[in-house]
Amino acid sequence: MLTKRIIPCLDIKDGRTVKGVNFVNLRDAGDPVELAAQYAEQNADELVFLDISATEQKRKTLANLVLKVAEAIDIPFTVGGGISSVEDVDVLLKNGADKVSINSAAVKRPELINELATAFGSQCVVVAIDAKQIKGEWLVHLVGGKVPTEINLFDWAKEVEQRGAGELLFTSMDHDGTKAGFANEVLARLSREVNIPIIASGGAGELKHFADTFTHGKADAALAASVFHFGEISVPDLKQQLKAQQIAVRL
């Protein structure tokens, strides 16, 4: 059985880690390099670094900060924000990223997924999808959730897989920062419709939510931010609790 992964997420704005609710009302959560080192020590399985204002500000990801984080950790490291070309990814991998996460750029130019998978391998390409439910339909949103599209979540997820993505990072905007649990019904449907691993994001508030998303949501990994950053849940405690519930994790 594949082990389930626990992934802290660093949302970066102006060089600091931030966290909001439903993608707004951001507050400071600390120094990204210090937090990254702490999560590596706590035996987190991976780390995700998202430069959340890069696309909106039409600039590239903070490569120097990526390098500093990479030097502080010894766990797999995914970086996203402002990536729109093979050249962008090359810079990030040279600065210590193991994988990249693309979102808005992939929707605007889906061929980017094919290009990155060809250049670096599918295992390097994570496609992040931010979606919310509008009139009963889950629709993809861009630019940190600010720009709605008419694209159906499930159709896009299938296309992403066909184009060579190695993994999906799905964030329910309706659940993000609410601490009310992950969008498990949607996650379970996604897991039925695609064959690549799915990272659940948005809604973690207590230990039970992680177990629920692995069992009911069929997620392969669970990503969270504020509950880890503000010390509400520790990665080692969470893993011990999951193990006690017969959920396979790496201790």
Image (tube, grey):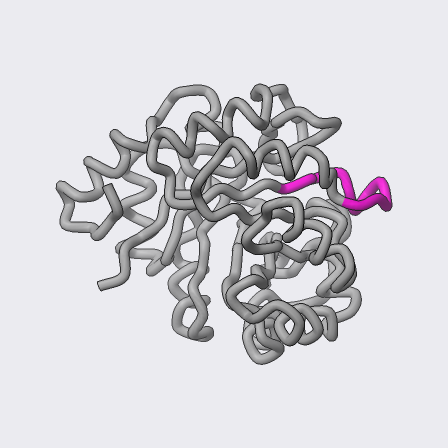
Residue lying farthest to the right in this orientation: 58
**In front: 178, or 240?**
240
- Location of residue 52 by image quarter: top right
**What secondary structure prevails in the magenta region?**
loop
Residue 164 lies, with reference to residue 99, above or below; the image says below
User: Where does the C terminus fall, quadrant-wise?
Assistant: top left
Q: Position of residue 199 (x, y in %)?
A: 45, 54
Residue at 62% over, 72% down: 117
- Location of residue 1 by image quarter: bottom left
Give the number of marks: 0
Residue 182 lies, with reference to residue 85, above or below; the image says above
**In front: 31, or 234?**
31
- 194 part of magenta stretch: no
**In front: 233, or 76?**
76
Residue at 61% over, 35% down: 11
Residue 162 lies, with reference to residue 189, above or below; the image says below
Q: Is residue 43 left or right of residue 74?
A: left
Q: Position of residue 248 (x, y in %)?
A: 21, 52
Residue at 76% over, 55% down: 88
Residue at 58% over, 75% down: 164
Q: Is residue 139 left or right of residue 8?
A: right
Q: Position of residue 203 (x, y in %)?
A: 46, 40
Q: Position of residue 47 (x, y in %)?
A: 49, 42
Residue 123 lies, with reference to residue 230, above or below; the image says below
Q: Is residue 46 left or right of residue 14?
A: left
What is the span of residues highlighted in magenta in the rendered image? 50-60
**In front: 201, or 8?**
8
